[in-house]
């Protein structure tokens, strides 16, 4: 047991010695962000690092995804760790030396940090392959931000073949540096997107009796959709129906012929997910028919709900308590945000946890997807240590 503890300590020291490099990698990616499904240069940058660590590398998995493979010198389990590396269509407003140089594109969710931390863990663990019993797959996933997402395509190209367990982490600006949030059960929602196009009969604003007003019909649809959660879904279940887009009309005195609505549905339970979809179709059909209009619905099923299994989650909780102390490991709060790591957990046991990234500086307090988003880079070490600790549980 002492020998295992000594080895883990040596890997931690290696990780800490590489901290400045991890920060450099993160800042490089922050300066040169790329949007989902367009992360060509970022993927090449990651590949160069993995090759320099002496890992076997496979690229273009399901698109721009890639993996680094670390084979230990002794047989054992295969454990996978995942980081995402796409950015968002947001203009970086921070006044920092590593501000985005790609106009209108920014790492506003910490994916550059996830990738730098996993690279750091890969670099540190690669120095100890002789002591490892098994294999580690370092998964670098593209396109987490944009459904259908990169995870689905990487899985379809067999990225999880031979993998026994998979783990992922996300930086959290609402959690203090030094804390990690872990918990079993549903933790992030399924996300669906819909578009409703209502075709009425346009005409002069002074003669509504000769028209079928798509704006009035669309307004009825919006109001009625808000009643799905309050009157059709059990209060013991969770669901969100949000209309984010309503486009119609071109002039003050013209009754619009067409109205277009876009929205999102967030749920945990699969039956509730299907029920909300059916209710949307039923409401739109009923209202448009009553007003003598026609309609079209385009409904996209996005990521499934993220469910952390009990056994592996409790194991990770206990392991991270040994790294950060019992007081620093808190319960992860369920949220209606979505994450395509859910696809991986549908295929293999594991867990997904959050790592605190805010300090006393208000610059680290901005929420994810904000143009001033930033984080305490010491969180990179905490993600790296978490992955190393989990790897050591299975492979040392």
Image: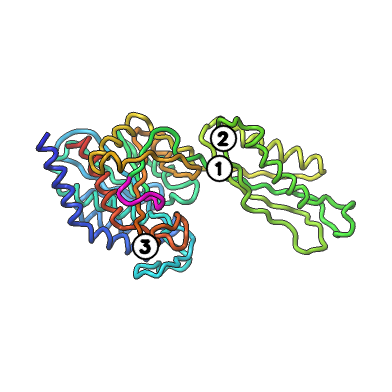
Q: Nearer the viewer, residue 368 or 56?
A: 368
Q: Residue furthest left?
A: 3
In the picture shown, does residue 269 fall above or below 71? above
In x, y percent, where is residue 139?
Answer: 32, 46
* Residue at the (47%, 56%) spot, across then down: 369
| Residue 273 position by quadrant | top right
Q: Is residue 238 visible?
A: yes
In the picture shown, does residue 278 fall above or below 375? above
The residue singled out by tag 3 in the image is 30
The residue singled out by tag 2 in the image is 273
Cα gap from disc 1 to disc 2, whole angstroms: 9 Å
- Secondary structure type for disc 1: strand
Cα gap from disc 2 to disc 3, whole angstroms: 36 Å
Choose the circle earlier in sequence order: 2 or 3: 3
Is residue 176 within the magenta segment? yes
- Secondary structure type for disc 2: helix
Position of the C terminus, as image quadrant, is: top left
Q: Are marks 1 and 2 in contact (CB under 8 Å)?
A: yes
Cα gap from disc 3 to disc 1, whole angstroms: 29 Å
In x, y percent, where is residue 48?
Answer: 26, 58
In x, y percent, where is residue 222?
Answer: 69, 46
| Residue 9 position by quadrant | top left
Task: Say left or right for 296 vs 124.
Answer: right
Residues packed near mark 3 inside 10 Å, few (<14), some (14 to 19) or many (20 plus): many
Choose the circle earlier in sequence order: 3 or 1: 3
Q: Is residue 162 visible?
A: no
Q: Which mark is residue 192?
A: 1
Q: Nearer the viewer, residue 214 or 110?
A: 110
What are the residue bounds of the magenta stretch? 171-179
């Amino acid at each position: 047991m002492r020998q295992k503890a000594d080895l883990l300590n040596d890997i931690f020291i290696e990780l800490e010695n590489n901290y400045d490099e991890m920060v450099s990698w993160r800042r490089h990616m922050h300066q040169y962000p790329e949007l989902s499904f367009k992360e060509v240069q970022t993927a090449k940058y990651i590949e160069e690092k993995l090759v320099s660590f002496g890992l076997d590398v496979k690229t273009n998995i399901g698109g721009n995804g890639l993996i680094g493979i670390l084979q230990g010198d002794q047989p054992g389990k295969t454990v996978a760790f995942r980081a995402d590396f796409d950015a968002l269509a947001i203009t970086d407003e921070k006044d920092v030396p590593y501000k985005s140089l790609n106009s209108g594109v920014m790492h506003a969710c910490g994916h550059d940090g996830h990738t730098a931390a996993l690279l750091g863990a890969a670099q540190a663990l690669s120095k100890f392959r002789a002591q490892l019993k098994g294999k580690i797959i370092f998964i670098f996933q593209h396109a987490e931000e944009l459904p259908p997402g990169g995870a689905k395509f990487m899985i379809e190209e067999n990225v999880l073949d031979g993998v026994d367990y998979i783990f992922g982490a996300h930086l959290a600006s609402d959690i203090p540096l030094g804390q990690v949030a872990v918990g079993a059960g549903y933790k992030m929602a399924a996300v669906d997107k819909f578009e409703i196009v209502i075709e009425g009969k346009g005409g002069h604003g002074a003669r509504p009796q000769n028209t079928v007003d798509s704006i009035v019909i669309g307004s009825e649809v919006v109001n009625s959709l808000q009643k799905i959660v309050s009157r059709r879904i059990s209060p013991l279940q969770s669901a969100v129906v949000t209309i984010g887009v309503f486009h119609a009309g071109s002039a003050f005195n013209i009754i619009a012929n067409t109205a277009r609505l876009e929205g999102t549905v967030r749920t945990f339970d699969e039956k509730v997910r299907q029920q909300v979809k059916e209710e949307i179709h039923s409401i739109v059909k009923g209202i448009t028919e009553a007003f003598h209009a026609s309609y079209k619905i385009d409904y996209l099923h996005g990521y499934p709900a993220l469910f952390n299994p009990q056994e592996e989650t409790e194991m990770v909780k206990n392991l991270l308590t040994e790294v950060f102390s019992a007081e620093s490991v808190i319960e992860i709060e369920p949220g209606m945000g979505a994450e395509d790591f859910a696809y991986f957990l549908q295929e293999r046991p594991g867990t997904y946890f959050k790592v605190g990234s805010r300090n006393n500086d208000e610059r680290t307090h901005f929420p994810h997807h904000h143009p001033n988003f930033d984080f305490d880079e010491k969180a990179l070490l905490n993600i790296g240590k978490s992955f190393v600790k989990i790897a050591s549980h299975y492979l040392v």
